[in-house]
Image (cartoon, rainbow, N blue to C red):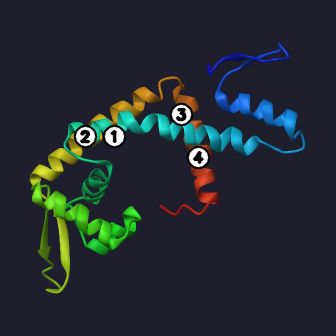
Amino acid sequence: MSLCQDNPKGSQKLHDHVELRRVQWSKELPDVDTRGMAILGRARWITLRVRPPIESVFARHGLDSGEFDVLSTLLRSGPPYQLRPTELFRSLMISSGGLTDRLSRLEKAGLVKRARSGADARSLLVQLTDAGRERAEAAFREDMMVEAELLEALTDKERDQLATLLAKLARALGESD
């Protein structure tokens, strides 16, 4: 189905699949408020649409999105680019087992190293290697270029407004990061 359909009433153009569904629902269940669908349905569609080009950035750098998440979390932590595994998995909102698997792959690729903490010999630190830092930075720079291109339909002011509104919604839904 085309994303720009003639409205059956002829009064306006329907601009996307979500609006078409809202019109259909308004006929079948006119008492149901579908404004949530107008926002969350589009957010879901947008997320699904932008994943492939973003994930292809990571693939070009020899990473999957989970591995990139680990490297970028270490990079944005600042020098010396190291964190405890518990800090990493809490930040990434994954299980400790999921993190262990990612760390093993990244260590094997020479992008991170695990070393005993000087302060506590029982504790491990995960640290970016120079190669990991270079790869994370290159992938992040390219990712931000792709994301900027994906948002070209919006003006700078519209991007700022949308970012502000999404941040407000995220806070209301309990996002703490």
For mark 3, what is the residue?
159
Q: Amino acid at mark 3?
A: Arg
Q: Amino acid at mark 4?
A: Leu
Say which of 149 and 52 sits in front.
52
Q: Are marks 4 and 2 in contact (CB under 8 Å)?
A: no
Q: Residues within 10 Å of mark 1 (few under 14, many from 20)?
A: some
User: How many numbered marks does the figure carry?
Assistant: 4
> Is residue 14 depicted above or below 134 in this figure?
above
For mark 1, what is the residue?
55
Q: Are marks 1 and 4 in contact (CB under 8 Å)?
A: no
Q: Are marks 1 and 2 in contact (CB under 8 Å)?
A: yes
Relative placement, left or right, of 15 versus 87 is right
For mark 2, what is the residue?
59
Mark 4 and mark 2 lie on one chain; the one further toward the N terminus is 2
Mark 1 and mark 3 lie on one chain; the one further toward the N terminus is 1
Relative placement, left or right, of 56 versus 128 is right
Q: Are marks 3 and 4 in contact (CB under 8 Å)?
A: no
Which secondary structure lies at badge 3? helix
Q: CA distance from mark 1 to mark 4?
A: 22 Å
Mark 1 and mark 4 lie on one chain; the one further toward the N terminus is 1
